[in-house]
């Protein structure tokens, strides 16, 4: 019902695209974790618009300002508040959207939900910019998980119809995931990455946009995290993932493809490997009965194409209740998927930290 | 972290497959709703194993016993507790699974999660049987929503590779959804239903199983339900849907297909229809920015094939930490999808009631 | 907002005084705890009406029926559901209260809150009988805490103006607390107990009732449980204690008396004792900054006199909106305080288990 | 378990006494409420140290900086974040307290709770300064409630043994409560206020401190707010009130005094007044069965004397585990009670707004 998530670790996200700032309160983060802020900034930079062809022209340094909860670089155990100032806001770009809702955006539903009082500028609280606080929280959680031997990483599984090589779900290494962190376009097959960039550039020229799928993995997870029924790893993760604007689908392990398999194809045999219980294959994506099995956690999230396109679109004038045309002039990504990668990683890191703390 | 879900409406599910009973406490259900128990039983019968070729041979009347919260057929506003006795339990069928976990089941992860103390009989708290209380809660919620002009219904979208005609997402009627409630196999195209049954029967003969996809719709929803970020309709729904065992993926509107569309293809133009704001198409599945748009809500959930198959499978002996073979003797469905349909409807009804009460 | 409490340990209480049954779902109780049911019954018997002069004449065995979550006497880690049947219900005693609310009862506020749909019989969900499920949950928690070296006990601090010897807050032993568990009237000074019984008997003869105060202690608590601000031990405990009908005040350590002390009188000096940090005195009642200090936790809860008295009282007829007189014929305690003692212990045990599991 | 409170309205408090700032995220506050910031500042000024004899010499303007959720002075419905900079921090005053915990403070319990990583400066997250964000949230809630015809106000009931005239609990007017808002020392009897100031001054001269009791009332509440069992008005209010440092007891209506009354004395007869159901007396303090009755809500909270006194005190050196003496040099109130008055009002306003939104 709110912009607060979690039980052991709680995150409370606030801000609008053009308000004074945006940010997050992270409540329940363990005490005594030394934070590498260089690493935090590197992770946040992956989400920030940075002048790439595929990203919005809005340039914001997105410097996270720690207001509380961290003393001399070490977490205190008390709530961590981070505020990111909104500095480069060109509010007049959005003057016409309040009463002429943009197709594919939350302008209309936000108007109804808040009886017209929500901040419409730049999408307000619905803006993709609100993923910056999530990524900050994820950056801290990634460092916490690293201390437990857990690594989270992701790649673009598919973009504009171009498919990357998927993860080999039984043989994902920390090295592989960390290498993806550093790639400008995180893909397993760089040639496919080039094709993706070409598709994005083409759509940008056409004033259009494309969607895609992000595949994320977490390795080093102990067996036994999560709970049956409503406390499942899938439930926890998906409730956070759908907090990323533009996410329209989530699947775990074989996912929707499992629906076309037989039981004998889908079931993963248990084996003993290095003295531990593992499975031979990993169609289950590291989760059985809502609980981690100790195999790599693998899931995918689908993102719709950016709704902001420069082509003229049909909408309605809410004031006069008549049809209207709209052309969106703002600065927008022709594809959010590259920037969604760290958001998905962040959501995974936050959810897994919460699950880890439930132990 | 638990078997409790919700904020305005809370449901607390309890029970193991072979414990004395299973059930649910429904907290926050509005006072003054007259419950049609015939309708509740009909809905629950759709989930209950009933001797169909595709369902387990375990026959349980699944009579919901109302312990509290309903007086003379009308809800009191106080917590409603319903207990369903477990009567036909053949515990010895499961004697060997405690230490030889069944592939695809939660036996191993449950063992680790609960340090060996969980009830392994019939899958314990992880059993698909635990969807019966969810369906009871959903039955009440469906009646509550009906009083608000909202109808929830679902069909088998795909089973064992056979695809049904999908919903026409701009023209779903209450009549259509209610007709699906009454079909023994809820499909839009009965010929496809016959093919699905043939696939199930074939897999049963082969000692194997199949998965599938359920498509669910809700119509009559007002615009403005749900919230941005973590209170999204998608987040609420998915956190419940992944509480149904065997669910491996969830998608809204165009879902994963949206990832292959361009913005100009995916965006739904706003129009005025009958004096109200609607969209011309419904790729957004009735949700924009996490909030209902007033268009039909449409989503799909993928279910893996039943993990219980009669073929011999490879596992490990946890006591001796060595490889072992297992043959599962119990009574099982070769396909859970037909019985998953009311579970998905129930999850939707519970989530939507919670969202409605948040208004 | 509901009859569900807690975060790590959650309890969901259901039932009305005259519904088919009452009970509780305990979610998050640790796996592997062996339950001594004899002990559970003994504890519940302390709350149950048992024919004493001071208790209602309603006799119910209050046998807790475990529906789920405990296998062969050991907790499974999954939700524990317990149902207590309502067997000895004389509903006609309450026929006239629905529209002529009893002074001091929740008849009127329940009627307004639930728009007239709540179950008025015996007070419905507001009945003191609803403490039986809390006491069941507390019985399990007491056993869990005992395994951690923590003992919870309570005595009647004051009843009808008769004061018992208070706890010596720096020297409470497990032996002392356990001895109180076994006393028919739990007081430190049995002579005072005799006087209390005399007051109760006198009030019973007069058709009147009396209130009192329960003092509760928990020893063996490690330092460091609880959290600052809204997660304080005081906040957690009081939110449960006010769930006991008739509770009107809660105080910790010196409590209201602290308001009349100076800082130099109230501050407890830190000392080292047996190699550990302790305080010389214990005006703080074992809590500083919302967190346990390792000193005995000491608090008191005030209970109002039973509102059911046999004297004629003035009320209103809600149907005709005119003044009315009422005489309450049912069976009632002239004093709830003796039976409130195990309720307070139970609330403390539940809250402390939740706090312990937060570590 | 955390610094987050609430269900419909959630507040998430963050900050340490000497961190960059302190603040609050208010999630779920209704859209469209016009905020009078002059009024907010006036309310916050009542809590802020202001050079009075009884307050700390630390002077901070405590300007609340609204980061999000309010546009052109009107609430958006999305989370409101407010940050208050910490400007006048003299951290070296607290250098010695990290390992020599101050009696009566949370230094020791905070150290244990957070394994030595908490920020000890000025009490860190435990500081009374953390009530400023609560008061900001309360200021907004008071304005929301005013729009519903509800007024909250409080006075010093007792301070250092000097008792003010208590509220006449059946005849509290909005005018009376609003007059108290404006008094430098909010008391009903100004002569008693003079005596209180004299006591404070005397204690200040002695290097000592005093405690007291705040009595708070809310009028204009509709009957029917709150819920039975764990959702009671008492439970909601007390869980917030114990979030105010130094609160040691809470009582509703007759409170602890009820424990010495008989039922015939304590029960409040129902009457009809101006066409509505009221009670003749108000021993129940406006709450029956956890639910508002429509009578004035009246409760009291007891505050211990300020633990910071200038006299030498005995403590332990945690590093060397040996006895130590401590003299506290910082700037401190000899009595927190006057500044606790707006905190209690704020807690009441937040709790009542949450309860109101549950309707």
Image (spheres, coloured by chain):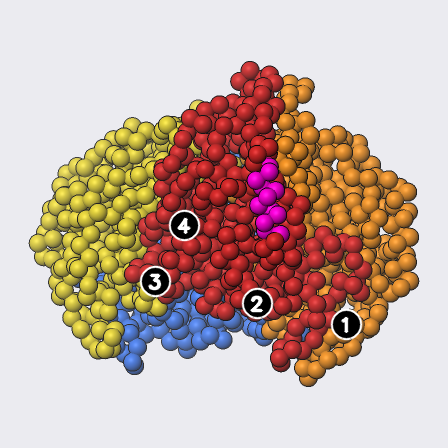
Chain colours: A blue, B yellow, C red, D orange
Q: Residue at x 38, y 45 (%)?
A: C61
Q: Same chain for the residues at labels 4 and 1, yes or no?
A: no
Sequence-first disc among 2 and 4: 4
Question: Circle 4 sits on which residue?
Answer: C25
Q: The disc numbered 4 marks a residue on which chain?
A: C
**Mark 1, chain letter?**
D
Q: Nearer the viewer, mark 3 or mark 1?
A: 3
* In the rendered image, residues at marks 1 and 2 fall on the same chain: no
> Which circle marks residue C74 in the picture?
3
Residue C195 painted magenta: yes
Determine contact: label 4, label 1, CB under 8 Å. Answer: no
Place of residue A107 in the rendered image (x, y in percent of width and height, measured from the top left)? 53, 41
Q: Which residue is mark 1?
A: D94
> Gap in Å between the C-alphas at discs 1 and 2?
37 Å
What crowding class fits label 2: few (fewer than 14 Cα within 10 Å), some (14-19), or many (20 or more)? some
Magenta stretch?
Answer: C192-203
Q: Chain of mark 3?
A: C
Judged from the image, the secondary structure of the residue bearing numbered disc 1 is: helix
Discs 3 and 4 lie in a common subunit = yes
The label number, if any, that marks residue C173 in the structure image: 2
Q: Which of label 2 and label 3 is nearer to you?
A: 2
Q: Please give the chain letter of the residue carrying mark 2.
A: C
| CB-based contact (under 8 Å), mark 2 and mark 4 | no
């Amino acid at each position: 019902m709110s912009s607060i998530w979690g039980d052991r670790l709680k995150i409370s996200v606030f801000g609008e695209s053009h308000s004074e700032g945006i940010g997050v309160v992270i409540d329940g983060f363990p005490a005594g974790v030394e934070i590498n802020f260089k690493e935090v900034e590197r992770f946040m930079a992956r989400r920030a618009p940075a002048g790439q062809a595929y990203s919005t022209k809005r340039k914001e340094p997105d410097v996270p300002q720690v207001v509380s909860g961290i003393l001399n670089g070490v977490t205190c155990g008390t709530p961590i508040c981070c505020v990111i100032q909104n500095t480069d806001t060109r509010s007049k770009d959005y003057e016409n959207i309040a009463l002429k809702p943009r197709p594919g955006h939350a302008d209309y539903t936000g108007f109804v939900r808040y009886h017209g009082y929500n901040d419409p500028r730049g999408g307000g609280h619905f803006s993709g910019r609100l993923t910056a606080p999530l990524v900050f929280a994820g950056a801290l959680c990634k460092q916490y998980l690293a201390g437990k031997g857990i690594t989270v990483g992701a790649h673009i599984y598919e973009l504009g119809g171009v498919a990357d090589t998927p993860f080999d779900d039984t043989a994902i290494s920390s090295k592989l995931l960390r290498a993806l962190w550093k790639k400008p376009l995180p893909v397993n097959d760089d040639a496919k990455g080039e094709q993706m960039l070409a598709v994005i550039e083409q759509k940008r020229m056409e004033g259009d946009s494309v969607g895609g799928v992000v595949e994320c993995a977490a390795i080093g997870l102990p067996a036994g995290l999560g709970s049956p029924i409503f406390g499942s790893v899938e439930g926890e993760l998906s409730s956070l993932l759908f907090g990323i604007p533009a996410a329209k689908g989530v699947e775990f392990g074989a996912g929707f493809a499992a629906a076309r398999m037989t039981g004998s194809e889908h079931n993963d045999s248990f084996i003993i490997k290095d003295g531990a219980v593992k499975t031979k294959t990993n169609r289950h994506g590291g989760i059985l009965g809502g609980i981690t099995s100790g195999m790599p956690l693998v899931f995918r999230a689908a993102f719709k194409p950016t709704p902001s396109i420069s082509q003229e679109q049909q909408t309605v004038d809410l004031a006069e209740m008549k049809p209207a045309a709209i052309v969106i002039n703002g600065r927008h990504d022709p594809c959010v998927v590259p920037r969604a990668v760290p958001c998905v990683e962040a959501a995974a890191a936050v959810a897994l930290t919460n699950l880890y703390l439930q132990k």
